[in-house]
Image (spheres, rainbow, N blue to C red):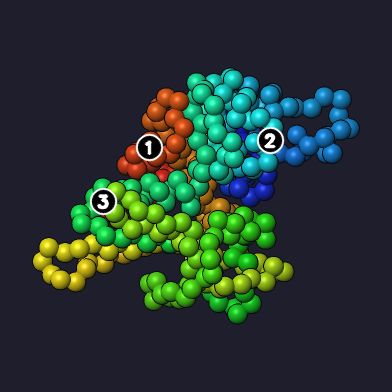
Amino acid sequence: MINIHIVGDGKNLYAVKTLLEINAVQFDDEIQVTCFGDNYLNPAYVRKFTSTLTMHDIVRGADIVVCTNPNYEDDNIVGLCSEFGIPLLCTFALQDDVAPHNNIILDDINLQYAATDMWIKRIVNVNENVKSIKHFTGISKTSETGENALPGLSLEDYQEVMNNVLGQPKLIKLQNKYFFASEIDSWLGDDNIDIQTNWIADTDNVDASKVDWHTETLFHTTVTSSSEYQTEDLVKHSHLLIPGRRTLNSWHYANACVVASFVYMWHRGFLPENCTSYEQIDHSTFVDNIFGGMFRLA
């Protein structure tokens, strides 16, 4: 029995749980996915009970821990996982440096960072004479009602995504559709390759009182390379459109796939011992399972 404990709340937590449970047959052993949130850990909700679970209990009883809420970093979840040698996958960036430990501790296991950075690294490795890479991740509504509704996310989830955005949005065109793009990060990679990541959406403002659940998540890359045979640069596009699945909207489904792929890689022994960065993971390993397969490059 593999005990997978997910600490967090909301749709991020249940998306990971749902995806793992409906694909339990992918694992060699039976899995038990258990979720823990405020109903277990917040004294305001559980004070009526004489005894309650602590973070210590949750970590000690797990084979692997997934955390989807950064607030639980303050409850020493990293220290406890290190103490008991339990692998920890966080969907957010840890604020504190990780002390020397004897287990796997990974953060930013999500679409915007882990999946994107491994994708970009793979593109650099399989292409020659690359000059620049522009990558776009975001959400698009499947039909336009003109209401500027939230794209399948709660206001809190949408704000969490937008916290990483820099500057003002600008209008761009991808696959014959117009989007508003905002830069997330930019840097010079190996061989002075200009790399930029961006958030895109089909509106530059939202009406927080309305939610449109019919969405698609976009994962688009534009690669510019110099050509040996012509004076003009060669521009290639890679476009991935991710719909929702069953009860999961597209954004939570895509992010759950990233987490589930890492859980599967751990289960199969593919994560390096004492791994502390997803950059240590090869992209081909990440996509070689049912969860990460959609991020495979041709």
x, y percent for residue 213: 60, 64
Left or right of 67, for residue 199: left
Q: Position of residue 76 (x, y in %)?
A: 66, 30
Q: Nearer the viewer, mark 1 or mark 2?
A: 2
* Nearest to the observer: residue 190 or residue 205: 190
Q: Secondary structure at mark 3?
A: helix
Residue 272 vertical placement versus 128 (above, below): above
Residue on which the image places disc 2: 74
| Secondary structure beneath label 2 | helix
The residue singled out by tag 1 in the image is 281
* Kind of residue sitting beneath label 3: Asp
Q: Residue at x 69, y 32 (%)?
A: 75
Residue 191's disc is: 3
Q: x%, y% of residue 147?
A: 64, 77
- Residue 139 shows in this picture: no
* Res. 142 mark: none
Q: Quadrant of the N terminus?
A: top right
N-terminal-most mark, 3 or 2: 2
Please state which of residues 288 and 166 is positioned toward the viewer in this rendering. 166
Badge 1 or badge 2: first in the primary sequence: 2
Picture residue at 20% right of the left edge, 57% below the top? 129
